Image: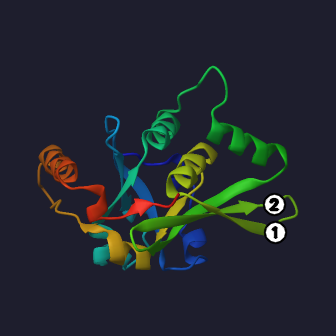
Amino acid sequence: GYNPPYIARFTLQRRCAMDLDMIPMTIESLALGLIPQPSVLSLRPSKALALPGEEDDDIYDRVLPIWIGPTEAAAIAAAIDRTRAERPLTHSTMAQIIRSMGGSVSRAVIDRVKGTTFYATVYLRCPNGMYTRVDARPSDAIALVIRADAPLFVSREVLEAAALPRSFKPGADRKIEMEEFHKFIEDVKPEDFVTEGN
């Protein structure tokens, strides 16, 4: 799994100031598919950012799989690995443009699911202190917030509609559990669940 560096800085005070139906997320895994098969990005709620009493909420025991294309998967993998390309990649360029204009990426939220499609919103902080919102595909939003070291959230409504129960149990062999989860992911088809918005 990928635990973003921002978790160490994102205080519970900031979490309290946000909509409590926005659940903080981390990346459980990224399973790269061979073309033409899609890749699967699995997100999980972060108990590290749960408020007191939230840890027992079963929403934190779910996994949200999102099928994404190979290009998007490669962009996210490069962001996670902090890979330095010879020339700037698209999402790195986006992050640099925002910074050079005096702005910053505040957060991204996967906030809607319609039919079989996810939608995300990226929140940008402008130089004047105001905020603006940008509609985005989840994969682009995630690739951007990783590079900007900003938090990712998913709305409770989306998790309740599209997340899967997590079978991991205290004391269980996590490696075996993850192997079983990935086998399950490989056996299902994207149309069985939800894909990201184009």
Q: Is residue 49 visible?
A: no
Dot 1 falls on a residue whose secondary structure is loop
Q: Amino acid at mark 1?
A: Met
At label 2, which amino acid type do we have?
Cys
> Dot 1: few (<14), some (14–19), or many (≥20) neighbours within 10 Å?
few
Query: Which residue is nearer to you in this view: 7 or 69?
Result: 69
Crowding around mark 2 (Cα neighbors within 10 Å: few <14, some 14 to 19, many 20+) is: some
Q: Quadrant of residue 19?
A: bottom right
- The residue where tag 2 is placed is 126
From the viewer's perspective, tell me whether residue 29 is left or right of residue 106.
Answer: left
> How far across and how far down the image is residue 101, in percent?
85, 48
Residue drawn at 17 percent across, 53 percent down: 184
Q: Position of residue 169 (x, y in %)?
A: 15, 61
Compared with 155, 172 (above or below) is above
- Residue 142 in sight here: yes
Please state the horizontal and vertical placement of residue 16, each as a whole percent of the image.
Answer: 56, 77
Residue 83 vs residue 191: left or right?
A: right
Q: Name the residue rendered at 48%, 42% in the picture.
A: 76
Whether residue 113 sits left or right of residue 35 in the image: it is right
Q: Quadrant of residue 113?
A: bottom left
Task: Tell me which residue sits at (60%, 43%) in the image.
Answer: 147
Q: Mark 2 and mark 1 in contact (Cβ < 8 Å)?
A: yes
Q: Residue at x 31, y 34 (%)?
A: 34
Q: CA separation, marks 1 and 2?
A: 5 Å
Name the one closer to the observer, 190 or 156.
190
Residue toward you, 121 or 99 = 121
Residue at image mark 1: 130
User: Percent from the top left, x then y, of residue 13?
Assistant: 58, 71
Above or below 180: residue 70: above
